[in-house]
Image: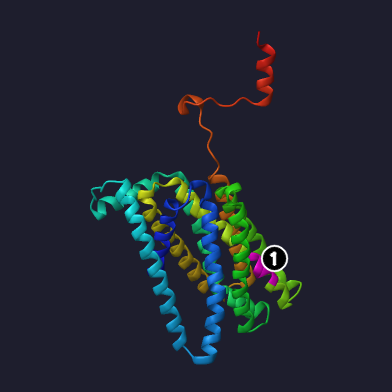
Amino acid sequence: MLTQTFDSARNAALPSLVEPAHLVSANSMVALNISVGRLIGGSLGGFAITRAGTGYLAIGAVVAFTTTAALIVAGRRAARRGAARSNPPERTSSFFTTWRSGFAAMLRNHTVRVTILSVALGGIAQGLFVVLFVVFVSRALHADGTLTGVLRGVQAIGGVASGLIVGMLGARLSSRLLMSLGATTFGLISLVIWNGPAVTRQPGWYVLLFILVGVPGVAYGSGAFAQIQQSVPETDLGRAFGAYYAIYNAAQGLGMAAAGLLGDALNVVLVLNVQAALYLASGAVAYVGLRPVRRPAARSGRKIPLSRSERRETADSAP
């Protein structure tokens, strides 16, 4: 519960810290930091628990969270001083009034609706993965918990690589492209993984594939966050991301429940192929639904640029 509050606030604060053109890069750098933190924290945690049990884990967590809180307080004070100099205090409405207005604004926003639909499909797919991944390693690869842990861990390596790549190229990549390409690539790699045992069960092959599957996840998330950050007013961003995470987690719960019901009734590879298809559908929704709409000149007040052939015909007919 606290994680959802923190993540929503973090994503809502980002547009006030960077220019709109750099939102994709900023989101990818956040994802990069998370992946690096998981790699370092997981390694330190594994070392600590084998040496001294859970005591040092608790101490390390307290130190990490306290440092995080101190950084947030310092940044908040600096932001508050800047806001006091530039903006007068505003009247605040009641909680339910602002909640209703923010929710209505999101429902009217086509970009938010399409983004959340795409994310919901991905959430169902992730729920299926969370439950059936362990079953896949055990039944399809005939491996134990060691390989399960390794495969989950190496995904962070792909996340680091993707964070660096998207961070450097973010200004040149559209958030729609990142969403559609990220979800589609995720689905295609997943299809290779789930059907791979028919060809080989060599662990090294799957370690490589799970490193690769960590790359499109960061790209997709960076694009989805940027879509909402660029299309929702700053006053409603917190509510928008609250709805984003609520729907994503509900969809993931639905996928987990479906996996629990279908995991033993059907072949696990068949169900996981459905999971990959859901990611492909998520990418298709993003690509088709988030296409820029070209408005007529009469409504937008702007002239529609002529095509090259039309410009040539106009020049030939001019006196």
Residue in view at x 62 percent, y 83 percent: 146
Q: Position of residue 287 (x, y in %)?
A: 58, 47
Residue underneath mark 1:
192
Disc 1 residue crowd, few under 14, some 14–19, many 20+, Cα 10 Å: some
Q: Is residue 305 above or below residue 250?
A: above
Q: Nearer the viewer, residue 82 or 149?
A: 82
Magenta segment, prevailing SS (helix, strand or loop): helix
Q: Nearer the viewer, residue 164 or 185?
A: 164
104 left or right of 165 in image: left
Bounds of the magenta segment: 208-213
Residue 276 placement: quadrant = bottom right
Q: Quadrant of the N terminus?
A: bottom left
Question: Colour mode?
Answer: rainbow
Q: Is residue 134 above or below residue 3?
A: below
Q: Nearer the viewer, residue 319 or 94?
A: 319
Task: Name the residue at the right extreme.
Answer: 199
Tell me the amino acid under the disc marked 1: Val
Query: Residue 58 in magenta?
Result: no
107 left or right of 318 in image: left
Q: Nearer the viewer, residue 79 or 108?
A: 79
Disc tally is: 1
Query: Residue 209 in magenta?
Result: yes
Q: Position of residue 131 (x, y in %)?
A: 54, 74
Q: Position of residue 107 (x, y in %)?
A: 39, 47
Task: Name the residue at the bottom extreme.
Answer: 52
Residue in view at x 50 percent, y 91 percent: 52
- Residue 78 shows in this picture: yes
Q: Position of residue 16 (x, y in %)?
A: 42, 51
244 left or right of 285 in image: left
Judging from the image, what secondary structure is the residue with disc 1 in? helix
